[in-house]
Structures are given as structure tokens and as C-alpha cells.
Amino acid sequence: MATTSVPVTRQRSDGSLIRALGVWGLAASIVNITVGGGIFRLPAAAAAALGPAAPIAYVACAIAMGLIVLCFAEAGSRVSLTGGLYAYVEVAFGPLVGFVMGALLWAGIAAAMAAVASFFADALGALVPALATGGARSTVLVLVLAALAGLNVAGVRGANRFNAVMTVAKLVPLLLLIVLGIGAVHRENLVWTTTPGLRDISKASIVLLFAFLGVETALVPSGEVEDPARTVPRAIFIAMIGVTLLYLAVQLVTQGILGPSLAGQKTPLAEAAAVAMGPAGRTLILVGMTISTFGYVCGMTLAAPRMLFAFGRDGFLPAQLALVHPRTRTPYVAIILQTVIVIALAVSGTFEKLAIIANGSILLVYAACCAAVIELRRRGVQESGTPFRMPFAAAVPLLALAVIVWLLTSLSADDWKALLVVVGVAVVVYASSLPSRRATRPEAAA
């Protein structure tokens, strides 16, 4: 089978970026984006759905995401362009499908980033009441997001190191709760009184699955990853194994401490920490919530602007978005624009309308990526090194697609309408950019 590569024009454009993300840096970015504010709320939702059997839902989610990230790993080892899943799909199926999926991915990322930025401001306001008022809250959001943008414009290495520090910082309170909380666990709280049915497990899994999302965003800066054929698969597996074990441990400890009362808690981890460590433990977890949401925004500020960079690079949006800073070698225009958009959404609150489409849009992109693996493999696409070959290679993409279709059946009619709006806008943008793309790169505008 002949081996093909991605268009040279895009390779050269990405070549102006610095490949500075190694295995542990990318793994830290995945963990940082995946472990957001949700882990501080999820144990109560899981307990409400399944009681002491809640850990089984995490296992089901891990299996489902395992199938999906295997597809990410192979696609990422074959295509190392900035844009992540958007680039994988675009190389496999062409610019139209690629851009539509990229638009859906960016919409979901932008909504999630704005929502968590807003949640960070609320968490900080709970710790410092003077910052909870409207004017002070907005000022905090603007200053924090602008500072993170400046850090990312200054260089990917510094931003990557800062993200690694934030990943450790957000994990410390959770690990302390696990270690110190074990002594307060009551075994009887972990005994199954009934065995949940498959339908109950599936309902709980649909809710919990989104706690595992984040890989798709962390892979967006693929054009800045060292040796992607080796780095991407290893980083994904390290991160996903670590996240799954962390979630299971947190669920077991909080369930063991609070028992039946866990299901009714709004801040389950903080209440469990108060029992295990006293008032100081509760404060520690509240601080951890603030750090965790801040860390998430840090990771998103590194990854999300690369989507806009990729759109500018490929001619769908103005070419200025693909400009790279001559000294720091970062996509500074894309970083600034992404930050302005997120600030506007987070401060105004209009991000809530976009959040409706986030879950469905990400799942559709997941499905396209799983299908892309089959096509990339068929065409023998690779850029450098030997691509990662997943176990049970023929079956895994099909199983992953089946899981995603099953999850998509839970979307409401309004969710589908919102998705169609994004798709419609993306098609209009694609069509309007076609003349200029044909003029500059005839081979890429088909």
C-alpha cells in the first residue's frame, strides 16, 4: 500500500511552530483539561443514580472512552498538524467535512472554556466574597484571561511548564482527600444492596462520560508535539489511565465517608473532607475547586486558539489568524482573538446558549475521527515514523462508532437543532472562502 502525506503547504505553515510538547507535557495537558470542576460534583450524581454501585459507571465510561481514544491515538500518530481532530478528519475526508467537524469542535471548546472560566470566577468569589459582585467578577475574568493569553503568546514552552505545575496543584487536594480520607471510610457504605440494571448503568454513564472529555482539546496543538507517532499514543494512555484511577478513588472514598447522604450533597468532596479532616479540609477542597477550574482554563488557553490558527492556515478564515510571532513562534493573533471571544461569552453569560450544543458537537466530531482512522489506514497516511497500530485494529473503530451512536440517541430535538445551526454556518463560511482558497491553493480547495 502506498504511503501518502499531508499537503506540503500545511506542513510548511506548521513548521514555523516549535515542537516542544513531549510525552509528559502532553499527558499533563490532557489531565489538566480532563480533570476540571466536574470531579468536585460527580460523586453525588453517580451515587444518586447507582448508590454504592456507582464505581461501575466509571468503569463503563472508561471502556467507552478507551475505544474512542484508541482511535485518537492512531489518527494522531499519522497526522501531526495543528488542529487535532479537525486535522485528522480533514486529511481523511477533505476540506468540507473537515471544516464542518472543526467548526463543531471549536464551538464545543469555546462554550466549555467560557463556562469553566465563569465557574472559576464563581468559585473564587465563594472564597473571597468581595470578588463575587458583578463589576469585580468581570474584572477578575478579564485580568486572568488576559494574563493567560500573554503567557501563551510569550512561548509554548513556558505555557506548557505552567500547565504542568497547575496539573500537579489541582491534583494535590484530591490526592490528600483520598489518602487522608481512607481512615474515615465505613465499609458498610460500600456494600451493594442491589445490582443495577444495564439501563441504569447506561443513564449514569452518559452523565459521567463527559468527565472524561478533554483529549480532543489537548490534541489541538499537534503541530507543536515532538515525535507525534510516539508521543501522542503514550501521552493519551498515561493520562486516561491516571484519570480513571483518580475518579474511581475519589468516588470510593467519598461514598465510604458519606454513605447514603452523598447523593444529596451539592459539594460532595468538600463535605467528605470536612468529615475526614475537619473545617480545614473543607476549605482545602474549596481552594482545590478554584485551582482546578483555573488549571482547566490554563490548558484551554494553550489548546483552543490553535483551532483558529488551523482555520486561518487552511484558508477558511482570514490568513492573519495563521500568523506566528517572529520571536516567540506562537500563533499570537489566534490566541488574542480566542481570548476576546471567551471573555465576551464568560462575562455576558451568553455562553449558556452555546453550552447546549457542546456535548452533541463533541460526540459528532468523535464519530468523524473514528471513521477517519479507517480511511487514513486504508490510504496508508503517515508523516514520520511508524504509526501506532491499535489492538484489534479492525474492530475498535466500529465499536467506538457504535458507542457514540448510542450516546447520540440521548440528545433532544433542541440539541439537534442547535447542531444544525452550527453546521449551516460552517457550510456558509466554507462556501464563501472557496474562491480565495482556489486562488491561493487550487489543490486544497476541492
Image: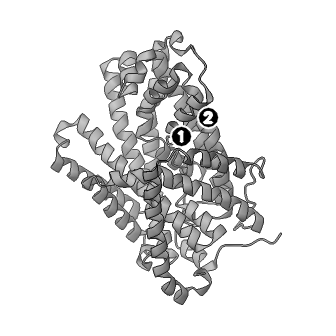
Q: Can residue 378 be seen from the camera position used here?
A: yes
Rendered position, 169 above or below 401: above
Q: Nearer the viewer, residue 287 or 91?
A: 91
Q: Nearer the viewer, residue 222 or 164?
A: 222
Q: Count neighbours of disc 2 (C-alpha within 10 A) and say few if under 14, some if 14 to 19, many if 20 or more.
A: some
Secondary structure category for the residue under label 2: helix
Q: From this viewpoint, which residue is outermost toward the right?
A: 1
Q: Count neighbours of disc 1 (C-alpha within 10 A) and say few if under 14, some if 14 to 19, many if 20 or more.
A: some
Q: The C terminus lies in which quarter of the figure?
A: bottom right
Q: The N terminus lies in which quarter of the figure?
A: bottom right
Seen at 59% across and 28% down, the residue is 56
Question: Percent x, y for residue 304?
Answer: 45, 59
Determine the CA span between mark 2 and mark 1.
9 Å
In the image, which disc is placed on residue 209?
A: 1
Seen at 64% across and 64% down, the residue is 79
In the image, which disc is placed on residue 60?
A: 2
Residue 345 shown left or right of residue 244 in the figure? left
* Colouring style: one colour
